[in-house]
Amino acid sequence: MSLFKSIATFGGFTLLSRITGFLRDMVLAACLGAGSVADAFFVAFKLPNLFRSLFAEGAFTSAFVPLLSHKMVSEGEERAEEFASKSISVLIFFLGIFTLIIEFFMPELVILMAPGFIKDPEKLQLTIDLSRITFPFLLLISVVSFQSGILNALNRFAAPAAAPVILNLFMTGAVFVYFPFVTSPAHNISLSVPIAGIIEIIWLGWFLKKAGVRLKACFNILSLCRSPEIKTLFRRIAPGIVGAGIYQINMMVDTIIVSLVGTGAISWLYYANRLQQLPLGVIGAAISVALLPVLSKHIKSDNKNEARRVQNNAVEYGALFAIPAAFGLIALAEPIVNILFQHGNFGAKETTMTARAVIAYSAGLPAYVLVKALTPNFFARGDTKTPVKYSAVVFSVNIILSLLLMKPFGHVGVAAATSLAAFVSLGQYIFGLNKRGFWNFSPELKQKICMITLSSLIMFIVLCGGEFLLDNFYKNWLTQNIVLKISLLGGLFILGVATFGIMAKLTKAIDYNEILQIFLKKGKKDA
């Protein structure tokens, strides 16, 4: 499969996953609102996903997939399949024990994760109960990640990329279809999480069978752990845990700190972060995935000029999407939150609090995306230690700023701390790449980013003016019926895109002739 087709497959299903994720969050907001029950559920939902990112999608997969690919090439598919069987047996054994231990010590873990819940015994107990339901998802989704790694090594990308959609659909459906023996909607939604994990395993298992992969259970775990290939796997997992762990601990610290703010704060940050993740997940991830192999090729061939050009393009494209997206989210935060989430138990207060967090998170969006564009420059050179060191600094900065800003600004202060830490991270990457002579901002690139920022600022002013006129014309337009609100927001969106497009042309932030030539060349190749 070509690189373009692989990226298109991943990007398409990532976008589908984000869309179904938004539908899920809209339904959850209407059902759970943003109070004590929602706070309890989101902590319970974060717990397995925290360890999932740390063990399965972070350290284990990044260590396992290269080893599996190497065995396929050097030793054949039969030996690779044998290695995969050993690896998944070890994974299930140790994660199974870990899951049982956490289930037993769940009260202590919840208190550690959300110390602010101690003053509300009912909320604390609900969180413990829901967490015990959701936590087995860690083991299930780790198996899913393992299956995805095998399929990716076989150049089969569609099924693994589609798997997250299953979780979104099951959680959405759980709001409307009750499982037997559950006592509340929160328990029902929590139960849908491990059920979705089982369905994902079945889904990918079918595609593995179709690909001719037959995994066999290995029960002599101690003997497996002494084998050279499993020892190599463990040695490669360790750095991954350090790298992924810093980011995940950072997320955990945010939850711990914001739990002290009060009821609803965890939910407000959750919904706000989901809005920010749409442009970050689609734009940032796409640039990072597409850039790494291209940059690696030019660096290995010692083509420094081409490497710099590609890196400049990645930064320019990142800025071109992220800066106007940030200004747009800041200008339209309240209307977007109102239309998406203000239904059922999610009221006007929740909209205001979530919108403030959206603004604080959005301010850091350009920094997040540009870091995604710059990180591959280190990975392409085989330097995985420097990004880990940078993450450690960002982790420390985030904690300090969160503690300083939490008291005067509450949950908004915690979100703002995350954005400020992102700019610290960006500064480290720019300084580090420049110091090593790998890359630096060219005068042309600086000018482009300044013009993109200017065009985005004018778009922001126009959007704010449009909102002001709507408020005066409709006497607070956000209180109108949903169809009218969506139509008016759509009009504002079109106005914003048109304004940015015109200003980008006038300031020469975008060369439309160059874009047209790219599409014309692509059209000729496709023909």
Image (cartoon, rainbow, N blue to C red):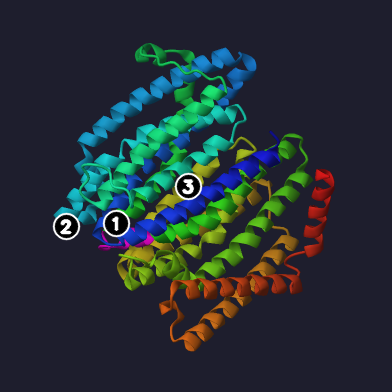
Query: In the figure, is residue 524 to the left or right of 320?
Result: right
Which of labels 1 and 3 is toward the front? 1
Amino acid marked by disc 2: Asp
Q: Check if mark 1's residue and mark 3's residue have beta carbons within 8 Å.
A: no
Q: Is residue 266 magenta?
A: yes
Q: Which mark is residue 38?
A: 1
Mark 3–mark 2 distance (CA, rounded to whole Å): 34 Å
Query: In the figure, is residue 126 to the left or right of 149?
Result: left
Residue of label 3: 391
Which residue is painted at 50% across and 14% down in the image?
82
Residue 71 pos. (x, y %): 58, 18
Query: In the figure, is residue 165 to the left or right of 219?
Result: right
What element does badge 1 sit on?
Answer: helix
What element does badge 2 sit on?
Answer: loop
Query: In the figure, is residue 445 to the left or right of 44?
Result: right
Mark 1–mark 2 distance (CA, rounded to whole Å): 14 Å
Q: Residues in magenta?
A: 260-270
Amino acid marked by disc 3: Ser
